[in-house]
Image (cartoon, rainbow, N blue to C red):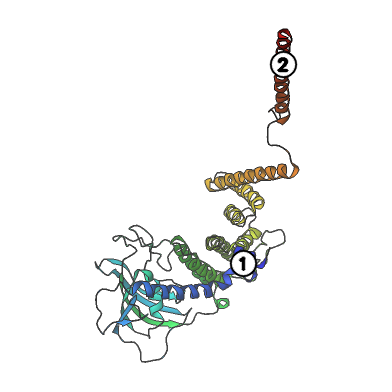
Amino acid sequence: MSEEERTLVDKSESSSFEDLASAAAHEIEEAKIAEAAAAEKEKIAEPKTDEWQDVLGSGALLKKILKPGKDSESRPNRSDICRISYEIKIRDTGDLVEKRDQVKIYLGDNEVLQGMDLALTLMHEGEENFLQLAPRFAYGETGLKTGESLGTVGELDGPKYDGPNIGPETWLEVRLELHDWNEEPEHETLPIAERMQIGTRRRARGNWWYGRGEPILAVQLYRRALDVLDESEGGITDPTPSGQMAPTSDALKALLDERLRVHNNMAAAQLKAGAYDAALQAVTRVLQCQPDNAKALYRKSRILSAMGRNSEALEAARAAAAAAPDDSGTKKELQRCEQRANRDRSVERRLAKRMLGTSDQPKGSPDKKPSRAKMFVWGSLLLSLLVGVASVLVYRYKLQH
């Protein structure tokens, strides 16, 4: 395989896609900001007063300071833990979307709407702002329907949205206050229970972004979850040769299970993003510890199919169906792989026949030899007829003379 072909198949190479997720998300965000700036510039119909600050220079993110913060040059940085309060409403109707007080978020992880995350990087301690968010920096083209999850930070089963549907053209207004912030602590200094809490919340938020068709942002959250769930002891990063985990404490076992769930989810997001090798690495880590994990085997089959490795995909699909025989998803995947394998065998047979010069006709069907025999018979009959006619003509000629 050439370098160019490998680049098309594997977007991550061997450097691990998840290690590049943060940088990739940042680059994509910059591109989206520039794109939104061009798209939204013509949509601002109403004039803004001098009180409003146009943060991006495009009218897509507007800011009005309601309460100045401390007179300091210090502002929060990416990954800092910010303590904030906010209230989100639909701009045109005033309907409440979500309200939170004294909640802690990790800045840069998109644990809140992207426009809010961006605005926080420009705020000082104690500052309170009034924001207007264009759809791109709010709920995007997907919008938010009544009854859908708000993806509230820190809650696995958070509240559902109960207001009117938010469409792809809906602007939001936000009251946002930054109380204070702290640097993120070293993960090694945190107890296992706190690691579990942080890792679970990041997985839940990653799932929310994945469900909204944003696999890159999902991978970013999953990667951040793995950072805090990592534990070098107890077999979490070094499973035993048999693939089974050595006996360990219940707390470490729970940490491992959560870590494997994150790897499984990240494989799905990387598959959706087209980073097939990275997705295969993620799902392989799960199977090293849990060889009969049906979800991991199912995703391995999907990844291998996307890579064109159909025979390996069929093997993984069979293993997934054996591990979860009653699961409809694994059954459908096995059927797809078997149909693909049958098509591949059919193509191989046709190619082999062409190479060997054999015919595709059934054994009992007539070939060209019977056709030539028939032509010979008809030719003989015609010749006999001509000879007969000639004989009659000769006989009559003799009688006349």
Question: Of the residues shown, which amino acid type is indicated by label 2?
Answer: Ala
Tell which of 215 and 398 is nearer to you.
398
Q: Quadrant of the C terminus?
A: top right
Where in the figure is residue 132, as x and y percent of width and height?
31, 75
Q: Where in the figure is residue 2, as x and y percent of width and height?
A: 67, 65
Earlier sequence position, callout 1 versus callout 2: 1
Q: 233 or 38, which lies in front?
A: 38
Label 1, label 2: how many angstroms apart (C-alpha)? 81 Å
Q: In this view of the protein, can residue 236 be seen by the observer?
A: no
Q: Are marks 1 and 2 in contact (CB under 8 Å)?
A: no
Q: Secondary structure at mark 2?
A: helix
Q: Which element carries disc 1, helix, strand or loop? A: helix
The numbered dot on residue 316 is none
Q: Is residue 7 left or right of residue 357?
A: left
Eyeballing the image, is 42 above or below 144? Answer: below
Residue 145, position as x, y percentages in the image: 34, 59
Q: Position of residue 256 (x, y in %)?
A: 59, 64
Q: Quadrant of residue 175?
A: bottom left
Mark 1 or 2, closer to the camera: 2
Nearer-the-camera pick, 9 or 90: 9
**299 lies left or right of 58:** right
Q: Nearer the viewer, residue 234 or 327?
A: 327
Residue positioned 33% across, 61% down in the render: 161
The residue type indicated by label 1 comes to Thr
**Quadrant location, the N terminus:** bottom right
- Label 1, residues with CA under 10 Å away: few <14, some 14-19, many ≥20: few
Q: Which residue is mark 1?
A: 7
Q: Please name the residue that numbered disc 2 is placed on.
A: 390
How would you rate the neighbour count of disc 2 (Cα within 10 Å): few for under 14, some for 14-19, many for 20 or more? few
